[in-house]
Image: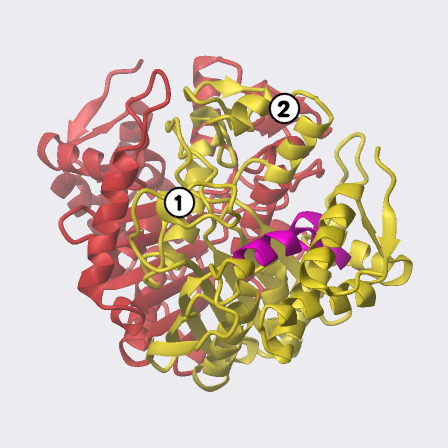
Chain colours: A yellow, B red
Amino acid sequence: MPELEIFSASHLHEFASRVFQHFGVPAPDANQAADILVLSDLRGIDSHGIARLRSYVSMLSIGRINPRPNIRVVRESLSTASVDGDNGLGLVVGPKANAIAMDKADHAGTGWVAVRHTNHYGIAGWYVLEALKREMIGWAMTNTTKIVAPLWGAEKMLGTNPLAIAFPGLEEPPIVIDMATPAAAFGKIEMAIRTDKPLPDGWAIDRDGNATTDPHAMVNGGAMLPLGADREHGGHKGYCLGALVDLLCGPLSGANWGPFTPPFTLDHAEPPRRVGQGIGHFFGAMRIDAFIDPTEFKQQIDDWIRTFRATKPAPGTTGPLIPGDPERLAEADRRITGIPLVPAVVEDLRFVAQQTGVAWE
Amino acid sequence: MPELEIFSASHLHEFASRVFQHFGVPAPDANQAADILVLSDLRGIDSHGIARLRSYVSMLSIGRINPRPNIRVVRESLSTASVDGDNGLGLVVGPKANAIAMDKADHAGTGWVAVRHTNHYGIAGWYVLEALKREMIGWAMTNTTKIVAPLWGAEKMLGTNPLAIAFPGLEEPPIVIDMATPAAAFGKIEMAIRTDKPLPDGWAIDRDGNATTDPHAMVNGGAMLPLGADREHGGHKGYCLGALVDLLCGPLSGANWGPFTPPFTLDHAEPPRRVGQGIGHFFGAMRIDAFIDPTEFKQQIDDWIRTFRATKPAPGTTGPLIPGDPERLAEADRRITGIPLVPAVVEDLRFVAQQTGVAWE
């Protein structure tokens, strides 16, 4: 394993914020964007944190992302809004749209916001944690660049299309579901390439649509498989989940969808046609007291958590986790010990420092 | 294979409705319940149709289901309601609660209804098809009797917890997602027992929590596995999905949840304690024009459908289906040719006829 360097969250936050400001992002927005990136690192989701700064920078530096978007509501009802992100950073558009969902919920009991003309928004978990602060159940989804084949397809048609939802406990920590819809994370395929190891079955197909355990075959024109992988193991359900997220984020907002979502980095080809604007997000917020007494609800959530923790463990395991456990434990640890970065990421950040003149050390 | 007998939908509908009325269910409610059962058979979901009539009857005949429930809204906001089903048939409570969600959406843009003290409601797909009739995107979920282990658990803790959502097309038929959250349907395990065949890997564990391909080991104290099955193949995601449905249907409504959901048939033991009332449902309805011009939306859905149908097919397949295709094709066929029933189901229905005095032939 390569040697890791450890950085404090505040150091990475300041660097990211200054880099965004270098490209004309206003300071409050730059801080907001840095918040989300650093929270991702703190929660152990290294693939979506500061490691992506260089990609954001590459898009900002050629004007493919608008640093000062005019984010506006283009349609609304008592409990809904559609937001045009004006091609801003998803890390800036997403929080504003998410806040609109919560404001709608304040008045109408729930709020639901579809967002078009936006870009990648970081971890879905950040948005639903915000809802918890306002005593709400939060939902967040986004569609993303194509990388997953539908069941019985031989090409990339859907993104990893993550879905998050969070429920507050009273004495127990919240239940935070934050999951992408393929069988595995793309980062694990990159890791297999770096370590030259085969993939488990059920993760990927090659360029002809045949199942493969060769990570190179996946990246060279192949695709990832949906959760469930094949028909016998429920691959149609994983495909349905990816489609659900795509349909709420794309057609409902007026964003691109499916194979037409624009790429997140400059490494990927532009899609053959546009069917909307940018990528899309979908946020929801549900006021708990619009359904049930909030204390009663949280007591039930506590009971649920304790009941599931007490499940008889499968052999060789310590028993089921509660969704959100790994990220919460990582955060508790990394807030104290700092954030470990692999050399390739540190090198990227030094490159960004050089390119922007923002001090890295 | 056993010889099938063919029956018309109208014959089965009339029989089911009369049987429900025999137990004191008012005629409109009995017809409503029969509608849902027969639509399930028409759409090829044989496990949830008339085959379940005997179970409903067994519960009604000992007073475990209330034939004349006082279904009432116990809490509401502009876009939400909580409904107490007064222990009625889910096939009666569900449609009323679903209609409340749509009525809320008429006014507030979206409507979301959590239901407690209810019973099994048939196919989730029925509810979302109703929303399509009102130009809405429909959502439906229910929790169910425990049968699925959480990842790393060695016992049943969650139901099959299905989730449905539907999106209307303009010229194309709608996209109808209707999926349970385990790796496979329990009906397939019953089928493996009847035909004495092993299960595919990834479907089940035995009473000790070890993976098994023996269907007898699953039913004798084992459990089904969540979609994804094990950690490497995303079993934590299938567990999260089952949990998501359970949390929205149980704690949010005041219904039982997880291992405490009451059993659907008299064959199963009562749970060790009660944490709420009955099982729970969760319905949603979103007015399309609360987000985007409905014609524009439907054109995008048509484009989505045509784009995904044109996916390069995986070897040995005809390419991806669109969610809802198999059920729609089954319905088109069975509305003309009738509904095939296996001898065991016909025998059950004859038994019900004898028990109730309702004529079967």
Q: Is residue B208 left or right of residue B213?
A: right
Q: Image quadrant of residue A74?
A: bottom left
Residue A165, position in %: x, y?
57, 60
Q: Image quadrant of residue A277?
A: bottom left
Q: Nearer the viewer, residue A93 or B206?
A: A93
Is A58 magenta? The answer is yes
What residue is shown with label 2? A200
- Callout 1 secondary element: loop
Q: Is residue A307 left or right of residue B42?
A: right
Going from N to C along the chain, the mark reached first, 2 or 1, is 2
Q: Residue furthest left?
A: B336
Q: Is residue B194 left or right of residue A295?
A: left
Q: Residue at x 86, y 58 (%)?
A: A338
What residue is shown with label 1? A270
Does the magenta stretch mainly form a helix, a strand or a loop? Answer: helix
Q: Residue furthest right?
A: A337
Residue type at numbered disc 2: Pro
- Callout 2 secondary element: loop
Q: Is residue B133 left or right of residue A240?
A: left
Q: Residue at x 28, y 52 (%)?
A: B126
Q: Subunit of mark 1?
A: A
